[in-house]
Image (cartoon, rainbow, N blue to C red):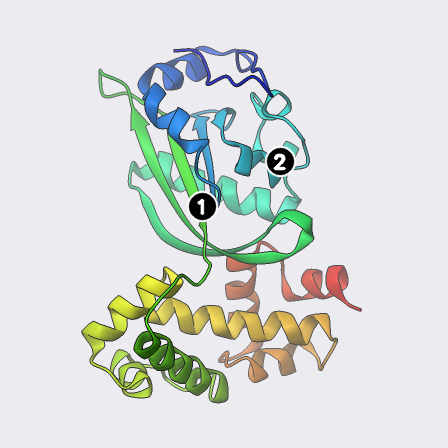
Amino acid sequence: MAPVRDNADPLPQPAGTATADALLVALSPAMVALMDELPDTMFCAKDVTGRYVAVNPVFVARTTERSRRAVLGRRAGDLFVPQLAERYEQQDAEVLRTGRPLRGELERIRRLGGTSGWFLTAKLPVHDDAGRLVGLVSVSHDLRAGAADDETMASLSALVAAVEADLGARWTTARLADAAGCTPATLERRVRRVYGVTPRQLVLRTRVDRATRLLAAREGTIAEVAAASGFYDQPSFTRTFARLTGETPAQYRRRTAR
């Protein structure tokens, strides 16, 4: 199967290994073509050596390149800042080593124009007809609040306000539901519908959002930012922040400080 082509950006055959060819054969042409139609979702397929063999335009726009031609056949380290590339490669290695999918991975990724936003990532191993592992496919969906009824939005506004007012609290599902004025089951449905994450992921996202604002404004030391953002201590804050954003707090502060 040849890579998907379009008139604006004709594609060469990816740099050329048997592993790349095996992955392309295993992929559905219709599925790969459909990925081009998703406006808020990054898609890629990598062979077992870590080389990209298929990407969509949204993925290309998040790299240092401007065309799929320049992306195919390269690796994460060639296209992303080191912190992001290292995280992607660690995720890929785990999926390929275990053969288990990665689902629901909450990440903060820079969007077009340099702004950053929250994405939910999934990665699945790909096998050929003989059952051999030939690579993986990955999607990262841009999480933006969707349309919802007034009752839902009022409930979630109350929830977010409560979490932001006490980031360091132990936010159990029951406590979150109480803050939202609904049952745990209703809370789960509402948060997933509007934010695309679980209630616990929403709490974590809120804590990291607070931290990014404080870091960019140079308000306090790293330890003080950790405490103000609801983290138990600085080491746990640094580990979590780096896992979700691809940068340590210190690196983020140096890059964004105003």
Q: Residue at x 32, y 75 (%)?
A: 152
Rendered-image quadrant of the N terminus: top left
Between disc 1 and disc 2, whose residue precedes? 2
Quick check: 165 left or right of 23? right
Figure disc tally: 2
Q: Which mark is residue 140?
A: 1
- Amino acid identity at mark 1: Ser
Q: Residue at x 33, y 37 (%)?
A: 124
Secondary structure under badge 1? Answer: strand
> In the rendered image, which residue does mark 2 sit on?
77
User: Tag 1: Cα neighbours inside 10 Å, few (<14), some, or many (≥20)?
Assistant: many
Can residue 27 be seen from the camera position used here?
Answer: no
Q: Within the image, what quadrant is residue 105 found in?
A: bottom left
Q: Is residue 27 above or below residue 248?
A: above
Q: Within the image, what quadrant is residue 128 found in?
A: top left
Rendered-image quadrant of the C terminus: bottom right
Q: Please identify the residue farthest to the right as the structure is shown.
A: 258
Asked if the residues shown at circle 1 and circle 2 are in contact, with their CB atoms under 8 angstroms apart, the answer is no
Residue 142 in picture, x, y percent from top left? 47, 52
Residue 62 in picture, x, y percent from top left? 60, 41
Residue 208 in picture, x, y percent from top left? 54, 70
- Mark in front: 1 vs 2: 1
Q: Is residue 44 above or below residue 249?
A: above
Residue closest to the eye, 49 or 16: 16
User: Tag 2: Cα neighbours inside 10 Å, few (<14), some, or many (≥20)?
Assistant: some
